[in-house]
Image (cartoon, grey):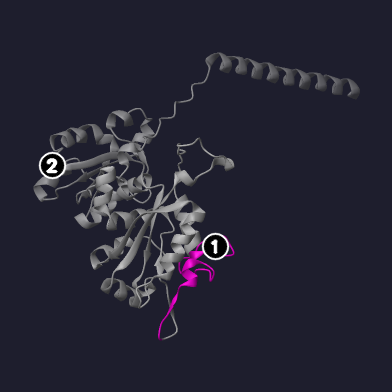
Amino acid sequence: MRSLDRVSKLLTLRSLLLIFPNAKLPTGECPVLVELLTQLESILCTVLWQDEELQLTEHNLHKVFFKSDFKLSDTLKELILKEPCIAVVVQFDPAKFRPEGEEPPEGEVPVVSLPLGDIEYKLANKVYGLQDDETIDCNKPRDDSISGSFMTTLEDDSLMPSIWTPVKVIQKSAAMDALYPDKLLEEFKYTEDKMPPQQVIMVFEAINGGDIEEVIVENKSIVYRHGYFDSANPELAKLVAKTFESLKKFPDDKIKATKLVIGVTEWADDTLLKFTSSYPLYISPDPKLGSKEAEMFFPYNYNELKEEKPVAPVVQNAAVDSTSNEEEDELEAGEQEEEGEGEEEENKEEG
């Protein structure tokens, strides 16, 4: 996911569209492409490049439609694996942008940045149209949208879409990374981040962290990450500290409730024995589960996560306490004096 986040930030002005093989007429013409190119002007976009013979494969198909709600039917899947699609990569054109209707000085192109997700929304709005509730549904395009206007009717009278564009940023990033990694590398020097190694998670009482960190240093080649968390449950755990030195700033009761979590990349018995003398509370049963746990404890942006800040203990002011006590004594004495006066008056009345 970190790689796709990086792609998203690189391509805020770009998105892409796929035109499926069923969009082409027997004559070779492609009316949906013509309509698309016509409508790009209205959202200030131009074609950056166009790939007329893009052949999708089983290998990249999943990533192209990663996290997309688009329902890829078996019929359409078979078609796009057999015949090439047309890919159109578009870019918001700053030269067409006019701030508040003003004309920029001659020869100058305004510097424009779009909010994350803006260009995807603009394109998806053209391709699928807005529903009555202002949402975009790639599986139910409006009849007057590009997708709705160019559906293919199959023999069973079902409709097959002829065009697709990502609705969300993460979908666009995945598709661009799957289809054009070389272009991303050439233009942005972008390479996909390496996946973290398989790991086994070990959990200890944090109070023993000082001694265990010495073992970690001695075996740093097999320790991928370690940190201190408020729970041993990876789905609930929140980071408290990254080192025992930071953890020591917390009150004793906080330290006692904290767990030290370690991700190790080797899990042979002799390796685990190096840590088991510190009495682990939990060890992943296998690296498959351990890797899932590690992903939750140590996400891709773990190095950027902030440690919890210790709450300074409340120190009461002795002078204030003394004054407060004196006031309480005076108040109590006054109440007793009033009670005494009341009793005297009652005795006089009785007499």
Q: Position of residue 291 (x, y in %)?
A: 24, 52
**Residue 240 higher or lower than 61, as above or below:** above
Q: Which residues are magenta?
A: 128-155
| One can see residue 122 in this view | yes
**Residue 77 higher or lower than 310, as above or below:** below
Q: Position of residue 257 (x, y in %)?
A: 36, 39
Q: Earlier in the sequence, mark 1 or mark 2?
A: 1
**Residue 273 higher or lower than 143, as above or below:** above
Q: Position of residue 295 (x, y in %)?
A: 29, 50
Residue at the (35%, 47%) spot, across then down: 5
* Count of number-bearing discs: 2
Q: How would you rate the neighbour count of disc 2 (Cα within 10 Å): few for under 14, some for 14-19, many for 20 or more?
A: some
Q: Quadrant of the rendered structure where residue 59 is?
A: bottom left
Residue at the (47%, 63%) spot, across then down: 127
Q: How would you rate the neighbour count of disc 1 (Cα within 10 Å): few for under 14, some for 14-19, many for 20 or more?
A: some
Tag on residue 345?
Answer: none
Residue at the (25%, 46%) spot, across then down: 186
Which secondary structure, mark 2?
helix
Tag on residue 130?
Answer: 1
Residue at the (50%, 53%) spot, across then down: 43
Spatial CA distance of label 1 from label 2 is: 60 Å
Give, as a three-letter code, the residue at label 1.
Leu
The residue that label 2 is drawn on is 274
Q: Does the magenta portion include 211? A: no
Query: Which residue is more in the foreground, 273 or 160?
Result: 160
